[in-house]
Image (tube, rainbow, N blue to C red):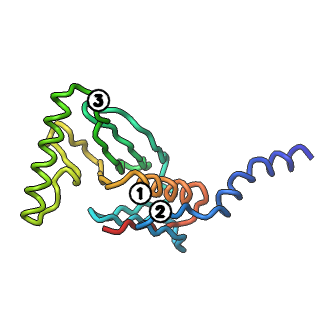
Amino acid sequence: MKLSSLLLLTALPCLTLAQTPAPATPGVTDQESPNNFWDCTLPGGNYTVALNRISVVSLHEFNLTGGRVTEMNIVTEGAGLARFYFMEAALPGSGSAAAELARTRLTELANTAADRTGTEKVWQKVQKDYPLATHAHTVEFRLQNKADLTALHASAKRAWITGKGRTVSIGS
């Protein structure tokens, strides 16, 4: 009797997760797929991983000078690490007034220049300072909003925990 009760208590969270629909996020499609992969398509590329190779799916936040980062990592049994992140500027008043004013003015000037030339804003892409900020075997994707990142995390975690493949994409 104790063993069957223990099995039921252990399986209940997994059954609940499997039956709960993925949260709806505008611009994100997430559906179960018949294979054993988590396949993610983003405006900046594609990342596909075998579910049985995933060892960690994490989501965390941290502060940087001048901003805040929300980051999801998928660690695999191999040498690869996938990093998906969303960056936001520090709230007004959280730093010095002069630094905040300079950052605001530089952002305005850069936006104006990008709009005039029809180019993508460079800070909306992954930025690396080779070789200082680049790590071997790391694949990085920068997302445009936190809700998309949260949806990706929910999808990856759901696929990993249930063992059922998922295909998720974020529109450009």
The numbered mark at residue 93 is: 3
Q: Earlier in the sequence, mark 3 or mark 2?
A: 2
Judge left or right: residue 171 versus residue 11: left
On screen, residue 46 above or below 90: below
Q: Give the camera-side residue of 148 and 17.
A: 148
Q: Residue at x 74, y 53 (%)?
A: 11
Residue 94 image offset from top left, x and y in percent: 30, 28
Q: CA distance from mark 1 to mark 2?
A: 7 Å
- Please tell me whether mark 1 sits on a helix, a strand or a loop: helix
Q: Residue at x 41, y 57 (%)?
A: 148
The numbered mark at residue 25 is: 2
On screen, residue 43 above or below 11: below
Q: Residue type at mark 1? A: Asp
Residue 95: image quadrant is top left
Q: Residue type at mark 2? A: Thr
Q: CA distance from mark 3 to mark 1?
A: 27 Å
Residue carrying label 1: 148
How many other residues sit within 10 Å of disc 3, few (<14), some (14-19) or many (≥20)?
Answer: few
Q: Residue type at mark 3? A: Gly
Q: Residue at x 17, y 56 (%)?
A: 121
Residue 108 image offset from top left, x and y in percent: 14, 48
On screen, residue 30 above or below 72: below
Marks 1,2: beta carbons within 8 A: yes
